[in-house]
Structures are given as structure tokens and as C-alpha cells.
Amino acid sequence: MTIMKSVDYAIQVNCIEDTQCKLKNIIERISYFISTPLARSATVHLAEKIEFPILTLCSKRSWNYTRFLLEMPILLKKLNKTTTDIQLPYDFLALTNLEDLWSGYGINLKSDLIECYMGRNRSCEDSGSWARVYTVFGSCFSYETDEPLLETGPFNNFYGKFRIKKKDLEAEIPNGLKNPLATASVGWTYLLHNEHFTPALKARFGQDLSPGLNQDSEASKIVVTGTNVWHKPCVEPATDPKYSVSKCELGCFTEHHFRLSNVGTEKWCRLPFMTEGKHKSARLCSTSEEYRQTESLVFKMLEDGLWDEGQCKCMPRCEETLYGNNAETVVGKRNTESRLRLFYASKSYESVLEKLAYKGVPLFCDIGNSMGLLIGASTLTLIEIIEWAAWSLSNLVKNIKRRIYHGKIRADN
């Protein structure tokens, strides 16, 4: 009897411990499923044709100093000031509005880009088009091809030859016309991006091309497809086809500028590149003082850490095309010229697919396995208990019958 109780107790203890393990395993599987783990897989594709990235070019000389000098007499006469009293470019708002100032007095691409081909013996204008865009560098230009590329290689894609006049290279530019975000007073910077991207703030992170240097820049393309999950949300293209992180950050920057200026909606004004956010339709700065104060705060936000992208809650796109480049630079023949070759080495590109690493079917399979073991353990214990109960009941009945039998014998005697 004592041995059977010990065996039964051991069985029950093992059963309890095993049951706890199975329940713990089930809870762990459910918790893992709720955490929505993601897995990434990369695939290399070889296409028949490939989209060329949008190329945005900015001159580090934001302004056409020669035009300012030519029109200086008109400004002096209107403001009744001397040359030493003029603050460039701000005071020229007395002659024009801010957008015309940026476009009309900014660097003209044609004065810098003296040769441009997109494909063998095809001019850039025959294969695509240039558009003026506004960034923290002022007036820049974006080039977009009309059709995907059928040919690749350094002699079949973009070729640009830049030139800066020697007098401009040696000229002393007034401080007001120098952009503090530029790494030099002359030269160019370029950026590769997709159609949803805005270079307004990101132009300052572009690839530098200095006078006297030639670059062969190999482009690369990656298509990233993400999964919209609770702990890593993204914006579906169907929800907002024109959305991009760069536009969201520009809107965030504009709103932060508005709050830091602390002048109210009526007095606050924006610069031409501030085209996103709640105040994207606010008026452009119209006076020299407004322009100077607004631009000064922009530079402080970007240079002195008054703002950074981490302050913005911008979700990525669920589907994004990213472009990169690997540039090799050599010294050219003339210090007033530069050459840029931008090309694909082949029509291959990489796609990155993000998907759930643990879906519902594996979850239910794991739970089913654990439940099967759990149920098996409980059935075995139940059988042991029934067997012990039957054996105990049988012994009890035998003892009772034995006592009754012996009691009758004594009574007869």
C-alpha cells in the first residue's frame, strides 16, 4: 500500500512538472507570435531594361554674383544706399519676390553644365528633361529620363561636363552669398533618388564634385518591400502614393521652424524649399529682414543641432526604391572643369522582401503538438488513478467481506 502511494505521488509530481513545461511552451509560442518577428530575403534580378535614378545637381555657388553686380546700380538708386550698406542677397527683395530671386539670381545650370549626354550621341534633352527644384542650397536642378534604359555601361548612360569661369573661381564672394552648409565656395554636389523623394533637406548629403576632378560613378538599385506590422508600421502605396520619408521630414522641419521662430502665423514666412507640412502654403518672405531671420534660423537648425530627423515620427514606405553609387575620382586636366559619368554596370538590381517569420499556421502546429503531449500526459495519469482506485476499492471490498464472514462464524459458535 505504501509503495503504491509513493509511485502514484511520483507520477503526479512528474505530470505537474511536465504540464507546466507544456503550458509554458504554449505561452512562449503565443508571445513570439504576438511580437510579429520579421525575416528578410534578398534576390538579384536581371531585367531587360532598368529605370535610371533622378539626378539632382546643386552648385555650391548658390548665387550668380555677376548678375548682382550688374543690377547693383538699380538697387542702390531705389534704396538710396551705398554699396557698403547693401546686404546680399536679402536687399534685392526690393526689386523682386523671393521665388524669382532664387530662380533668377541663382546659378543657371547652362552656365555650369557645358556638355550633357544621356546615352551614346544623345543629348540629355533628347532623353529626358531638367526641372528646377529648391533646396537648402537654393536653386538646384533635377534630371529625369523619359524611358528606362536598354543599355548600360560608362559610355551609354549619363555624361556631364562642368566648367566654372576662372574669374569666378578666384573671386572673393561676399559672406552673404556663401552657403554655410556647403563644404566649399565652388563646385557641385549631386544626389540620386526616386520620384517620391524630395532633395530639399537631403541635398547637403550629396556626393561632392570639385573643380579639376573627374568622377566615374557606378549606380546601384535596391527595391525594398516591407511588411506593415504593429511594431514596425509603414505607409502603403495605395494609402498615399506620393508619400516619402524625406517629405515627412521636410514637413516636420518646417513645423519646427515655425515653432522656434515664435512669431505667430501672420508674421511667420517660409523659404521656397519649405513645401511640406501644415504651413506649406504660408507666404514667402517678402522683406530683407524677414528673409535674413528665416534663413538664419534654418542654418542654426541644421548646423547647431536645433533640429534633427530623430525628432520626427516619419514612417517608411512599405515599397521603396533606393539608389546608391560608388564613385572613383581622378584629377582632370584643367582646374576649372569637371566631368561626371553616372552609369549602371549592368541591368541587374537587388530586391529585398520583408515578411513574417512566424505565421498563424506554424503557431497552431506548435500549440497542437504541445497540447497533444499535454493531453497524453493527463490521460496516462487518469488511467493510473483509476487503476489505483479500482485496486483500493477491490481490497476494501475483500476486507469487508472477510470481516463479515468471520463475524458470522463467531455468531454461529
Image (cartoon, grey):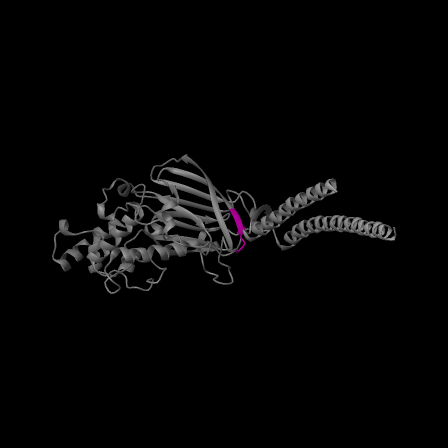
- State the extent of the magenta-drawn residues as a range: 221-228
Foreground pick, 120 / 233: 233
Q: Position of residue 236 (x, y in %)?
A: 51, 59
- Helix, strand or loop for the magenta stretch, by majority: strand
Q: Classify residue 73 as left or right of residue 382.
A: left
Residue, far front: 413
Foreground pick, 73 / 320: 320
Q: Classify residue 264 as left or right of residue 220.
A: left
Q: Point out the image quarter for the N terminus.
A: top right
Residue 150 in view, yes or no: no
The residue under the point 15% across, 56% down is 76
Foreground pick, 37 / 129: 37
Q: Position of residue 345 (x, y in %)?
A: 54, 42
Residue 83 in view, yes or no: yes
Q: Position of residue 73 (x, y in %)?
A: 16, 55
Q: Position of residue 250 (x, y in %)?
A: 37, 55
Foreground pick, 394 / 53: 394
Q: Is residue 224 magenta?
A: yes
Q: Is residue 62 magenta?
A: no
Count of labels shown? 0
Q: Is residue 335 above or below residue 158?
A: above
